[in-house]
Amino acid sequence: MDRDETLGQGSPDPELEPELERKQELNLIDEMGGPQGVADSSLPGLLFVAVYSLSGQDLQLSAIAAVVLGAAIGLVRLIRGESVRFAAAGFVGVAIAGFIATRTGRAEDFFLPGLLFNAGYAVAYAVSIAVGWPLMGVLIGPLIGDGMKWRKDPARVRLFNRMSWVWVVLFSTRLAVQLPFYLAGSLVALGIARTAMGLPLFALGIWLCYLLLRREGIDLKALNPKSSGTDDE
């Protein structure tokens, strides 16, 4: 019954299904923060590495350049009317990274907050699965009209567990690849790895979650930014 309610009445026009699916994927991506946010978070790191390498390892200048770029990106997002949360989070993250690097005097520490965030997210998703509150259910459940009722549906719990495991694996993969570069002090390699594993892995995670939702017959039309900000059902 829940699935029928979620799917809605009637079948969509077969000719419109490809376009509908594309819009559904984009809505899911937006709800997870959007690819632009992931890409924007990589740019200050790349600039930091570039300035550090070209300026004769001037750590102070590199940190300032990265923070200024982070502020500029946040300002542009605000001017465009995008989420204040994402704009502020991006700037604060860069500012903290720059502060840590200048305090410790180690350029690779600019990427330490990112490593800690990846570790924290991996642990948080894993713990949420262990305690029966998979984070993907908490995030997605209200958007598809389930609220928190999904916890009483074993099939839904299994679905959100699988979706949460996707992010456990992806965050852990980032950490496994980048941590050795950090420990070795390989700044350039670390910067490249972070960029290469940013947007591509994010896109992969979103795609896998979309496939899992689609396999369960869940209508992602409910996943749109307008309804998520106003609907409490």
Image: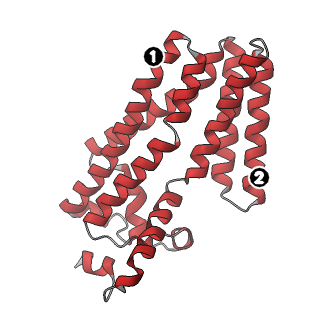
The circle drawn on residue 180 is: 1
Residue depicted at 65% across the width and 58% down the height:
83
CB within 8 Å, label 1 to label 2: no
Position of residue 33 in the picture relative to residue 220 (left or right) = right
- Which residue position is annotated with label 2? 76
Residue 42 position, x and y percent, is 61, 37
Q: Distance between the residues labelled 1 and 2?
A: 34 Å
Residue depicted at 52% across the width and 44% down the height:
199
Q: Quarter-wise, where is residue 72 in the image?
A: top right
Q: Within 10 Å of the Cα at label 2, are there few (<14), some (14-19), or many (20+) other Cα atoms?
A: few
The number of numbered badges drawn on the structure is 2
Task: Please name the amino acid that badge 2 sits on.
Answer: Val
Q: Which residue lies furthest to the left in this view?
A: 154
Q: Can residue 137 be seen in this view?
A: no
Q: Is mark 2 on a helix, strand or loop?
A: helix
Vertical comparison of 56 with 148: above or below: above
Q: Is mark 1 on a helix, strand or loop?
A: helix
Q: Quarter-wise, where is residue 81 in the image?
A: bottom right
Residue 223 position, x and y percent, is 46, 68
Vertical comparison of 46 with 128: above or below: above
The circle drawn on residue 213 is: none
Position of residue 154 in the picture relative to residue 164 (left or right) = left
Residue 168 position, x and y percent, is 35, 39
Position of residue 206 in the picture relative to residue 61 (left or right) = left
Q: Residue furthest bottom?
A: 10
Query: Which quadrant would the C terminus be assigned to in this image?
Result: bottom left
Vertical comparison of 136 with 43: above or below: below
Of residue 29 and residue 99, the one placed in the foreground of this image is 29
Task: Please name the amino acid that badge 1 sits on.
Answer: Pro
Query: Which quadrant would the N terminus be assigned to in this image?
Result: bottom left
Sequence-wise first label, 1 or 2 = 2
Residue 63 position, x and y percent, is 75, 24
